[in-house]
Amino acid sequence: SAPEASEPQVTLVAAIILSDGDSAASGASAVSVSAIADAVIVLERGATPTSEPDDSPDTTGYQVHVVDWTDPDALAAALQQVSSAWLLVLEAGERVAVDQVGWMADLCSLPMEPVGLRIGDRVEVRLTPTGPGAIDLIGSETDLVSEGIRVVPSALEQIGRASCRERG
């Protein structure tokens, strides 16, 4: 039978973007991850009451919630509203590089455990099953690493392609 209208829709992957007021950076992250996430939610810490999102129709393709994500209780309350199997967490300005075949293989074969993503020369947990304490694992080390998705740090975007060519 069809779910009741009041039941939240459960998605496979919800991307959570942690922002400190840089709407351009959080927007770039949201666009980057939108192809692989069923829901994209920006948790905006730097917003003031006058800069909170208004009630106009969403044309960005992502939601913005004003919440102090450095406050564990406020973050936990915000994440309780997320109905997905997985949380993918990015900092505003970070982007994802995706190998679609590898990503689909990850989704089908990875155990429901915290998963590390490559970020430059390191690996840290950025993909984790939704649930109590899930966000506490973000940034920790793990041996379980995704082969289908990498995080591109915002600093790499600022360097630009010209300096990469100079190195080669």
Image (cartoon, rainbow, N blue to C red):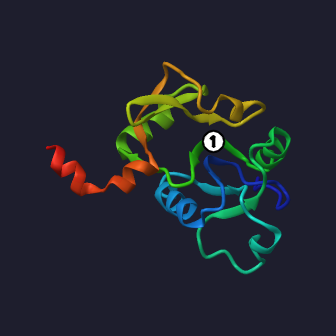
Q: Residue 130 in the image: state x and y as whole percent.
A: 70, 37
Name the residue rendered at 38%, 31% in the picture. 121
Q: Nearest the camera: 110 or 79?
A: 79
The answer to which quarter of the image holds residue 41 is bottom right
Name the residue rendered at 61%, 76% in the picture. 59
Name the residue rendered at 43%, 29% in the picture. 122
- Which residue in the rendered view is the most extreme toward the left? 168
Vertical comparison of 62 with 166: above or below: below
At label 1, the amino acid type is Leu
Q: Residue 77 in the image: state x and y as whole percent.
A: 84, 46
Disc 1 crowd rating (10 Å Cα; few below 14, some 14-19, many 20+) is many
Q: Tell me the residue that label 1 is attached to.
A: 87
Name the residue rendered at 61%, 28% in the picture. 112
Q: Residue 51 in the image: state x and y as whole percent.
A: 75, 72
The answer to which quarter of the image holds residue 2 is bottom right
Q: Residue 36 in the image: state x and y as whole percent.
A: 49, 51
Q: Nearest the camera: 39 or 108?
A: 39
* Quadrant (top left/top right/bottom left/bottom right) for the C terminus: top left
Q: Nearest the camera: 152 or 158?
A: 158
SS of the residue under disc 1: strand
